[in-house]
């Protein structure tokens, strides 16, 4: 008895919890992007709904509706031109959670699934990592299972179900989900894609992996941002050459770095030539990262800016993929330099200059000066926390904190070089990257962002990296590969790829002419149609098959070892039993007397089956 | 079983018999089926459950003559068939018919008779005639034997071999009556006297007419015959069964099914008729390899394994 009890599950409870998990999936996806208050309210609502569910208390529907309308209104009020998305999503989240508190018929559950689906879809605006695929799969399974359960409950009118039935439903849900894969894949390939994203709205909250301005003294600490900036498909090169150039700075005002120089004298570049392909996943403000030092990028609509900086002319929300050629271990010879590279900020302190002179005392050769500065800076601590927060960040860094991030090291070195009359500039970009031998690419994350110094020494621009920054540890390879495949195959799949795929499809060659092909297709159509027609008439001709089918809908399954009348004894519904008996009598009278079924007989029998069918339909609509 | 009977005449007979034989409705229906199928009935039951009452009531209601043979191991064949006795006045041998020359013959405790006597009886049943001293005497029509045997007492008995049992269309057991019925019986006391006073309900001719009607008018389709043969064949193939069904058994099934169809107010046989008759017709005709199994179970499992028309 106890065993039986434990094996039975209350269908209502099961559906409730499945639906709850279903909503939690999209919620988790958008959790980081909505306000903490909304998440809090979501949790409270969910908690209340669980309590209500077990206490069997229900909130009147009108309250829920009023609250929902109010939430939509509130969202409308909060929408700003910069961000119309977040208020809408927050409202959607709240409406979703409040749905759980009220009465829950299948209609409410379907609303819940639809809202969850919307929310899950919306989450892709913020995050399109391959985790989405897993989320969608789980979501699909749960939703299909719940819908199957709902249907099962409605059809059987049973309040409990055995573990066996539940398992079967789950199996069925798996099959349905599995069957939907080829169809989805087909849609993925053939559905037309807009060249630009549909939601081309300003994302106030969207992340940028890179900033083209460098401001010192404004933040206390920097969070390690694991966002993937780009993947670079190329051969593995020595770690010390992994500098990804994005932008250069030449002017410093005491706190911020700017770029003012646009042109320079002609260059002569030599070194080891490397060609590579970059898949840029996070935007770097129209700047295109390249391996230091770049020769050229192959991408239309880009502009080159001195020195070694490329940018796209039009902003794009899409991922950008380009191939480029660079030189490592390069020698960059420029005969002249801009005077800007010697400018010092107006408010530069005497203390700073004094310190510079102290460090480089007795040195005349630029190489030696550089060495002294590097040696001096190596006594400073590299840190992302407890950064100098002050109006004079350089002083704070040099004399008080004695620790900072690359921005401080690079700035100090560049300024010291200028004090000593050596032209210098600061280069912003990324340092390092983890190489994936399976995918054959480097993965560069936002946390790899870096700043270093270039100095003009005897007609050459030479790279110096003063910050003793530890290089990042290598990462798990498998997830990176998944990530890469997801991005290249799914996210990056666009109109062009579609066209390419369509073009690559060759039409199979038939030996006969076009007219023959036409006849061939016509023939197949006729065969299929006549087969279908034959099947239809056969069913019509055999009213017994229809009869059995109809009763099957009532959950009455006839066994092969059962006679028709024996089978009818099982029917509980008196009305149905009478109709069925009428049919069976009429059928048997002909069948067991070895008579031929005349047209009239078939009509009569089919009429009875029709009546059973109509009866079933009307009863079902009444139930609903 | 009684609720399925739709034929008015039969229903009246059954109801009338039921009024004087409390709690034996299925036995009544089955014995009527055996009778109208021109078969014979074997009742295996304990003494004192109303076998004789059933036979007497049947004979009275159907206005048939009734004879009774109480078997013992010294019973001679002539005690059943009758014998020729010298008539001094006429100066010739005169045939004195035995109890078998009745329409309904109750052969009590048939397994107590010697095989010799049993054979004589069974031959008479099969041939519907008796040969004494070279002379053949036709038995009256209809001719219906109700034999009984006690399942418990074995000492001094000669159990009928299966080949002999085959001659009985059905083997039934009456079983103990329900408590209410038993109360009624005890309250009223033995009704044996009253049974003899029962009004006849149908004439002998009418019974013969119905028998003929069932034989001629009830249609049994080839499909149902195939169904019966499917079953018969399965009993022969089944590895739990040592001896399967004979052709006679198949014939008995179809005859009983026809009668049952008639009782149910139809002029054609459906598989359900066959299916419902099989448990009474088949068990005493088969021998199981393993005696500990239940014959009914084996038969049911065979029935469950064969598909029923029209859904093949």
Image: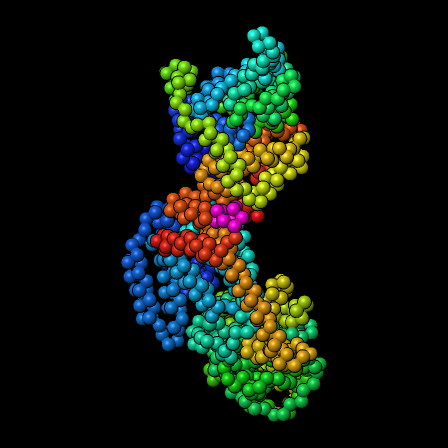
Q: Position of residue A297 (x, y in %)?
A: 61, 84
Residue in the picture at 32% in, 62% down: A68
| In the displayed structure image, the side of residue A530 where residue A117 appears, left or right | left
The stretch of residues the image draws in magenta is A587-595
Q: Residue furthest front?
A: B90
Can the viewer see residue A535?
yes
How far from the left and from the top, in percent, is residue A204?
A: 43, 74
Q: Residue sitting at 44 percent across and 27 percent down?
A: B203
User: Can you tell which quarter of the image residue B168 is in?
Assistant: top right
Magenta includes A63? no
Give the quadrant of the N terminus of chain B: top left
Residue A397, above or below A610: below
Q: Is residue A89 above or below residue A364?
A: above
Residue in the picture at 58% in, 79% down:
A499
Name the spot of residue A564 as percent of width and height, x first.
49, 45
Q: Residue at x 41, y 18 (%)?
A: B195
In front: A189, or B116?
Answer: B116
Q: Position of residue B146 (x, y in %)?
A: 53, 22
């Amino acid at each position: 008895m106890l065993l039986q009890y434990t094996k039975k599950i209350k269908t209502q409870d099961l559906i409730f919890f499945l639906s709850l998990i279903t909503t939690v999936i999209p919620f988790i996806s958008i959790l980081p992007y909505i306000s903490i208050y909304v998440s809090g309210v979501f949790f409270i609502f969910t908690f209340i709904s669980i309590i209500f569910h077990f206490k069997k208390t229900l909130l009147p529907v009108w309250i829920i509706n009023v609250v929902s309308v109010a939430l939509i209104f509130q969202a409308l009020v909060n929408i700003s031109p910069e961000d119309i998305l977040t208020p809408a999503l927050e409202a959607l989240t709240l409406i979703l959670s409040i749905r759980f508190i009220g009465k829950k018929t299948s209609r409410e559950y379907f609303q819940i699934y639809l809202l969850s689906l919307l929310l899950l879809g919306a989450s892709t605006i913020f995050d399109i990592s391959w985790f989405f695929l897993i989320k969608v799969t789980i979501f699909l399974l749960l939703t299909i299972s719940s819908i199957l359960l709902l249907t099962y409950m409605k059809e059987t009118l049973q309040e409990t179900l055995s573990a066996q039935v539940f398992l079967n439903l789950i199996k069925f849900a798996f099959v349905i989900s599995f069957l939907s894969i080829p169809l989805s894949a087909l849609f993925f390939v053939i559905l037309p894609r807009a060249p630009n994203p549909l939601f081309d709205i300003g994302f106030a909250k969207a992340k940028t992996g890179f900033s083209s301005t460098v401001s010192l003294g404004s933040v206390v600490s920097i969070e390690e941002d694991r966002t993937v900036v780009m993947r670079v498909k190329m051969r593995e090169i020595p770690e010390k050459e992994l500098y990804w150039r994005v932008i250069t700075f030449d002017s410093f005002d005491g706190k911020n770095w700017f770029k003012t120089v646009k042109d320079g004298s002609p260059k002569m570049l030599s070194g080891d030539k490397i060609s590579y392909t970059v898949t840029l996943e996070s935007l770097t403000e129209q700047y295109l990262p390249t391996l230091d030092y770049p020769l050229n990028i192959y991408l239309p609509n880009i502009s080159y800016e001195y020195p070694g900086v490329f940018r796209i002319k039009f902003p794009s929300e899409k991922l950008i993929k380009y191939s480029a050629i660079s030189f490592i271990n390069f020698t960059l010879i420029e005969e002249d330099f801009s005077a800007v590279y010697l400018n010092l900020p107006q408010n530069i302190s005497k203390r700073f200059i004094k310190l510079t002179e102290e460090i480089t005392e007795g040195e005349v050769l630029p190489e030696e000066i550089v060495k002294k500065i590097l040696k001096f800076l190596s006594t400073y601590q590299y840190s992302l926390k407890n950064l100098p927060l002050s109006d004079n960040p350089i002083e704070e860094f040099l004399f008080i904190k004695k620790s900072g991030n690359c921005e401080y090291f690079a700035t100090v070195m560049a300024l010291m070089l200028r004090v000593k009359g050596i032209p210098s500039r600061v280069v912003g970009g990324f340092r390092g990257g983890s190489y994936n031998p399976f995918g054959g690419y480097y993965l560069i994350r936002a946390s790899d962002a870096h700043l270093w110094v270039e100095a003009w020494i005897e007609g050459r621009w030479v790279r110096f990296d003063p910050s003793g920054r530890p290089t990042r540890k290598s990462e798990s390879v498998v997830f990176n590969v998944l990530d890469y495949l997801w991005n290249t195959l799914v996210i990056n799949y666009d109109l062009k790829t579609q066209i390419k795929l369509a073009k690559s499809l060759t039409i199979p060659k038939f030996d006969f002419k076009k007219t023959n092909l036409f006849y061939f297709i016509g023939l197949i159509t006729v065969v299929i149609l006549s087969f279908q027609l034959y099947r239809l008439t056969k069913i019509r001709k055999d009213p017994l098959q229809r009869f059995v089918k109809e009763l099957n809908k009532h959950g009455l399954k006839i066994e092969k070892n059962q006679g028709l009348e024996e089978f009818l004894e099982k029917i509980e519904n008196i009305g149905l039993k009478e109709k069925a008996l009428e049919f069976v009598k009429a059928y048997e009278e002909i069948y067991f007397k070895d008579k031929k079924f005349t047209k009239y007989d078939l009509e009569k029998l089919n009429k009875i089956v029709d009546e059973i069918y109509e009866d079933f339909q009307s009863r079902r609509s009444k139930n609903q | 079983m009684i609720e399925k009977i739709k034929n008015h005449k039969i229903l009246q007979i059954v109801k009338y018999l039921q009024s004087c034989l409390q709690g034996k409705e299925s036995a009544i229906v089955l014995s009527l089926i055996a009778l109208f199928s021109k078969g014979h009935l074997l009742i295996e039951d304990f003494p004192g459950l109303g076998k004789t009452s059933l036979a007497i009531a049947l004979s009275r209601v159907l206005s048939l003559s009734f004879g009774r043979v109480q078997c013992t191991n010294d019973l001679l064949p002539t005690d059943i068939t009758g014998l020729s006795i010298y008539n001094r006045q006429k100066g010739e041998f005169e045939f004195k018919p035995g109890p078998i020359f009745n329409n309904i013959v109750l052969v009590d405790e048939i397994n107590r008779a010697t095989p010799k006597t049993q054979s004589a009886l069974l031959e008479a049943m099969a041939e519907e005639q008796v040969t004494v001293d070279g002379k053949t005497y036709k038995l009256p029509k209809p001719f219906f034997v109700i034999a009984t045997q006690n399942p418990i007492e074995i000492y001094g008995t000669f159990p009928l071999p299966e080949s002999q049992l085959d001659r009985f269309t059905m083997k039934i057991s009456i079983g103990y009556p329900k408590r209410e019925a038993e109360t009624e019986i005890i309250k009223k006391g033995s009704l044996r006297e009253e049974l003899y006073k029962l009004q006849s309900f149908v004439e002998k001719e009418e019974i013969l007419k119905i028998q003929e009607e069932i034989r001629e008018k009830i249609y049994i389709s080839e499909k149902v015959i195939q169904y019966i043969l499917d079953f018969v064949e399965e009993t022969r193939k089944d590895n739990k069964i040592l001896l399967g069904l004979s052709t006679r058994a198949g014939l008995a099934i179809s005859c009983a099914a026809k009668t049952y169809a008639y009782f149910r107010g139809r002029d054609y046989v459906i598989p359900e008729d066959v299916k419902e008759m099989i448990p009474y017709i088949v068990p005493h005709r088969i021998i199981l390899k393993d005696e500990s199994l239940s014959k009914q179970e084996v038969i049911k499992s065979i029935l469950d394994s064969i598909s029923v028309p029209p859904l093949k």
